[in-house]
Image (spheres, helix red, strand yellow):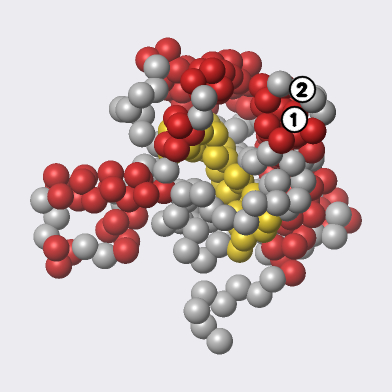
Amino acid sequence: MTTKRLSINKIRELGIDPKTMPNHVGVIMDGNGRWAEKRQLRRTVGHLQGEEALFECIEGAIELGIPWLTVYGFSTENWKRPKEEVQFLINFNRETIRRRRDELHERNVKIEFIGRENWRIPKGLLNDMEEARQLTKKNTGLVFTVAFNYGGRAELVDAVKEIIKSGVDETKITEKKISTYLYNNQMPDADLIIRTSGEERLSNFLLWQSAYSELLFLEDLWPDFTRTTFQEAIKEYQRRTRRFGEL
């Protein structure tokens, strides 16, 4: 059954204000390995279970009409993990794209990727990423972005290189100008960033876009994340007062 946006009344029944919804939610999906280890399972089993949690999150965003959802799929630092786990994660991401892109297409989701696509990613995976982009590029619902081979500092370094290469006059360099050279210059700043597993840091995720994000750190391990968890996160976001430096 295709997930659809809930009616305004249904959203209100959940205790959520449909008028103050975040425009962009970022998620650091942390705790797959620990979830598996607690159950004396291989870490890879945790990643597999994490896929189900990811789609709970996506469907939760669709139901609430969230325009943008960005998840941390694989960081530039993840290459430092054991070779076997890195290889599993590469293959796992490729298989997930293949398994799920049609489902997301049916749900009117637009699939995007941000990260260094010219560095270390196998050609086969790049092809699958591009096929997912092309399949869903005309969709008008949730923009679901996977930060893959991504690092916030790397994004800024790459933006600076492109600015220099373009010959932009230094007097013309503004925050707005820098934003146009990021991996996806259409991506709005993140209103809310959620991290699971009890860790309380950004770990190089959306550093530019998170300047005024509300940060929410959950004790839940990622495989235990559900659309109810997502709804509770939105409620917490709506309880906060956002000032953007003003009184």
At x 45%, y 38%, the residue is 77
Is residue 173 rendered to the left or right of residue 131?
left
- At a point 20% along the width and 50% down the height, the residue shown is 163
Is residue 116 among what the camera can see?
yes
* Extreme residue in the bottom direction: 247
Quarter the C terminus occupies: bottom right
- What residue is shown at x 41% (from left), y 57% (from top)? 208
The residue wearing badge 1 is: 37
Q: Is residue 138 visible?
A: no
Q: Position of residue 122 (x, y in %)?
A: 39, 17
Answer above or below: position of 195 versus 31.
below
Task: Please state which of residues 110 and 91 is positioned toward the viewer in this rendering.
Answer: 91
Per the rendering, the mark at residue 12 is none
| 11 sits to left or right of 210 | right
The amino acid on which the numbered mark 1 sits, given as a three-letter code, is Glu
- The residue type indicated by label 2 comes to Leu
> Which residue was labeled with disc 2?
41
Q: Residues within 10 Å of mark 1 (few under 14, many from 20)?
A: some
x then y, percent, for residue 64: 73, 48
> Is residue 210 shown above or below 81?
below
The quarter of the image holding the N terminus is: top right
Q: Quadrant of residue 110?
A: top right
Residues tagged 1 and 2 counted as in contact (Cβ below 8 A): yes
Q: SS of the residue at dot 2? A: loop
147 or 84: nearer the viewer: 84
